[in-house]
């Protein structure tokens, strides 16, 4: 599941993943996150950091503290260049991050790697 408030980012990532046979659910309004999570039960979450209604880092912390969802791999995609942003991402419990702009090969390699390593995946 890809959560980002930018439609073009959602469409690019979805296109890349579907070319590799990965079903991608996109979510543009993070307020629908929990309902969509329950409805789709994704194998991986790709999160943006800053969204209009809440912060992806805070969302990751909540996911990691929820025993039902805490095994889902979380990958951030970010354009942020703030000092220590990567430390914040990993401290929140993220499994990986990708900096924008990203190369398609980097995205798919990191996503496939996380999916294969996840103990909760139903491949």
Image (cartoon, rainbow, N blue to C red):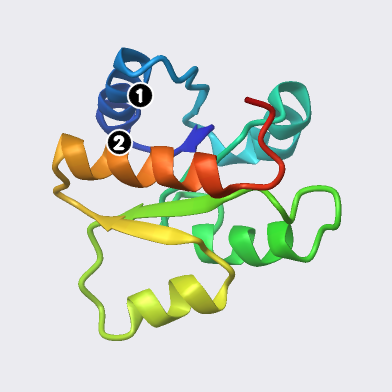
| Res. 45 visible in picture | no
Image quarter (top left, top right, bottom left or bottom right) of the C terminus: top right
Mark before the other along the chain sequence, 2 or 1: 1
At a point 45% along the width and 71% down the height, the residue shown is 89
Of residue 68 and residue 115, the one placed in the foreground of this image is 115
Quick check: 111 left or right of 91?
left
At a point 75% along the width and 30% down the height, the residue shown is 35
Q: Which mark is residue 17?
A: 1
The location of residue 119, given as percent across then percent down, is 69, 47
The location of residue 47, given as percent across then percent down, is 46, 48
Of residue 71 and residue 39, the one placed in the foreground of this image is 71
Q: Outermost residue toward the bottom?
A: 83
Which element carries disc 1, helix, strand or loop? Answer: helix
Q: Residues within 10 Å of mark 2 (few under 14, many from 20)?
A: some
Count of numbered labels shown in the rendering: 2
Q: Are marks 2 and 1 in contact (CB under 8 Å)?
A: yes
Of residue 1 and residue 58, the one placed in the foreground of this image is 1
Q: CA distance from mark 2 to mark 1?
A: 7 Å
The location of residue 111, given as percent across then percent down, is 40, 41
At a point 18% along the width and 35% down the height, the residue shown is 104
Image quarter (top left, top right, bottom left or bottom right) of the N terminus: top right
Quick check: 120 left or right of 103?
right
Judging by the rendered image, the residue that carries numbered circle 2 is 108
Quick check: 67 left or right of 53?
right
| Res. 84 visible in picture | yes
């Amino acid at each position: 599941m890809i959560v980002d408030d930018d439609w073009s980012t959602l469409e690019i990532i979805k296109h890349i993943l579907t070319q590799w046979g990965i079903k991608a659910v996109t979510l543009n309004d993070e307020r629908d996150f929990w309902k969509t999570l329950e409805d789709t039960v994704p194998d991986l979450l790709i999160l943006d950091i800053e969204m209009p209604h809440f912060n992806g880092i805070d969302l990751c912390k909540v996911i990691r503290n929820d025993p039902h969802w805490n095994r889902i791999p979380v990958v951030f995609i970010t354009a942020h260049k703030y000092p220590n942003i990567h430390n914040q991402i990993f401290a929140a419990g993220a499994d990986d991050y990708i900096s924008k702009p990203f190369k398609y090969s980097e995205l798919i390699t990191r996503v496939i790697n996380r999916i294969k390593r996840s103990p909760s995946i139903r491949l």
